[in-house]
Amino acid sequence: QGIALTKQVEVVGEAVGISFPFTVTLTPVAGETLATTYPVYDENGVFMNNVSVDGNGSFTVSLTEGQKVYIVNLPTGTAYSVQEQPADGWKVLSSQNATGTVAENTYNQVSFLNGPVSHGNLFLHKEVVIDEAAGKVTYDKPFEVEVAFAGNHSFDTVMVDGQQKAVENGKLKENLFLKANQTVLISGVPEGTNYTVKEVNLPKGWQGDKEE
C-alpha cells in the first residue's frame, strides 16, 4: 500500500530524457511516527531505491516521461501531499489525487500531466518629448535601456529584432539602445516570466517621464 505516482506529458516524445522532480510530504496519524526510508518500485515490481524521509516528513522522487513508480509500505491513515517542482520549459497542466490519505491495501493513484511552456513577445517603444521652448528641436542619440527577467523558467537567450542575444543572471547581457520613435521586439520569452524595463545612464538634461 502507498502511492502510485505517474508522469505524463501532453506532447509524447518531447520530454525524452527530462527528469521531473516531485516532493512528497507525509503526515503520520497522531501518536505514530514515520520510517526513515521507504522503498520505491517501478511499474513492473522491480525495486529501484529507498527514499530518505527528512524531519518534515518529506522526500524527493524524480520521474521521466511516461514513468510510473510505487512508493510502498506507507502506514494506513498517513496523509500525503505531492508537489511537482519546476522543470525548465515545462508546466503542469493538471494533476489528480495530489493530496490524500493512504488507505489499507490500496495504492492511491497520483498523476501529473505536463505540457511545454509557450513563449511570448515583448515590444519596447521609445518616445521622446521635445521641449521646443528650451531649444531642443531634434535629438537623434540613443537612450540606454536595461531589461531584466524573473520567474520559474530559466533561459539563456532571447531574440531581439531577429538576432539572438544572451541572458545572464536574469538580465539581457547587453543593454539596448533606442532612439526616438524606435521599437524593438524581444521574442522567445517563456510565459509567466516577469520583466522589468528601465532606462539607465540618461543623457544629461533628460529625464524619464513615464513607463507604459
Image (cartoon, helix red, strand yellow):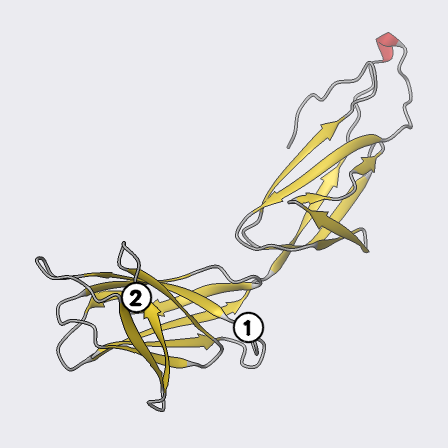
Q: Amino acid at mark 2?
A: Ala
- Residue lying farthest left? 31
**Residue name at image x 65 percent, y 40 percent:** 148
**Residue name at image x 74 percent, y 27 percent:** 200
Please give the residue where the numbered disc 1 appears in the rendered image: 18
Please give the residue where the numbered disc 2 appears in the rendered image: 98
- In the image, is residue 178 above or below residue 59? above
Of residues 67 and 149, the one drawn nearer to the viewer in this rendering: 67
Quadrant of the rendered structure where residue 158 is?
bottom right
Task: Residue 131: give x, y in percent of width and height.
Answer: 82, 14
Label 1's element?
Answer: loop
Q: Amino acid at mark 1?
A: Ile
Badge 2 crowding class, 10 Å Cα cut-off, few under 14, some 14 to 19, many 20 or more, is: some
Does 81 sit left or right of 193 as displayed?
Answer: left
Q: Point out the image quarter for the C terminus.
A: top right
Task: Residue 69: give x, y in percent of width and height.
Answer: 36, 80
- The span from disc 1 to disc 2 (Cα, nearest Å) is 21 Å
Figure disc tally: 2
In this rendering, which labeled residue sits more in front, label 1 or label 2? 1
Does 136 sit left or right of 81 as displayed?
Answer: right
